[in-house]
Amino acid sequence: MTGDLKNLDRINSSITKVVVEYCERIISSVGAEVRSIAVYGSATGPDYIPKHSNINITVVVEEISHNTLRSLLETVRWGLKRKIVPPLLLTEDYILSSLDVFPIEFSEIKDTAVIVYGEDFFGSLKMDPGHLRLECESQLKAALLRTRQAYLELGLTKKGAERVLHTSLTSLIPVMRGLLRLKGIEPPRRKADVIMALGEAFGLDGSVFIAILQDKAGDEKIGDKEAHVVLGRYIEQLERLAEKSNQL
């Protein structure tokens, strides 16, 4: 079975063994229904941190039935212990009929996916710029609502503001890449480079985003009191970015 896998040299070498076993388990469980398996996200790029970053995998199958889901339960439990999040199960019809709804997500998969088994269903996908702009604006405005609400809930807890910053920024990196695509800029793979490119393209203060990114990575620590100030600056930049996305 291992001989049927390909492109393993294009994923982080520290996860090759676990990805191979995971793929073997999926194919053993689902059988001929599996049309493609791809690793995507940080595990195929420079930001992957061994034993810390999650491993994202998408599986394209003929049909997603309840039996398919049940057959994968043991495999998914095995993977969770090894930082593999539950696989993104897709069908070809679902992909083609959902490009208008999830242009950010499919752009991210297209740009980062490494096909390790079967066909490539992502390389030729084309996202409509109008759909992409709308989802970017929607995600930014939703992030503003969530961030304010989370701050009200967690702001007085220990490291609460810091946790809000980490969660919010992580979810917005794909949106930032989408905004760069709308500007005709090829998004960098490194998160820090994405932020710097975004700041330059949209006239934003990217330093607050960089500070949060470094804090999350443990490079520089934002103290409890400082986190409240940083969060205020962060929300200001999100508001500006949401306004600019509305004008694209």
Image (spheres, rainbow, N blue to C red):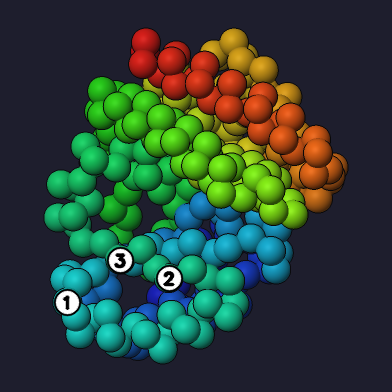
For label 1, the residue is: 65
Q: Quadrant of the C terminus?
A: top left
Q: Position of residue 17 (x, y in %)?
A: 60, 77
Q: Amino acid at mark 3?
A: Leu
**Mark 3 to mark 2: distance in Å?**
9 Å
Residue in view at x 58 percent, y 71 percent: 83
Residue 98 placement, left or right of 10: left
Choose between 183 and 153: the one closer to the eye.
153
Q: Earlier in the sequence, mark 3 or mark 1?
A: 1
For label 2, the residue is: 86
Q: Evaluate whether residue 45 shows in this view.
A: no
Quadrant position of residue 198: top right
Residue in view at x 30 percent, y 27 percent: 134
Q: Amino acid at mark 2?
A: Pro
Residue 123 placement, left or right of 84: left
- How packed mark 1 is, by other alpha carbons closer than 10 Å (few <14, some 14-19, many 20 or more), is few
Q: Position of residue 29 (x, y in %)?
A: 32, 87
For label 3, the residue is: 89
Q: Position of residue 240 (x, y in %)?
A: 52, 16
Residue in view at x 24 percent, y 69 percent: 61
Q: Amino acid at mark 1?
A: Ser
For residue 79, above or below residue 196 = below
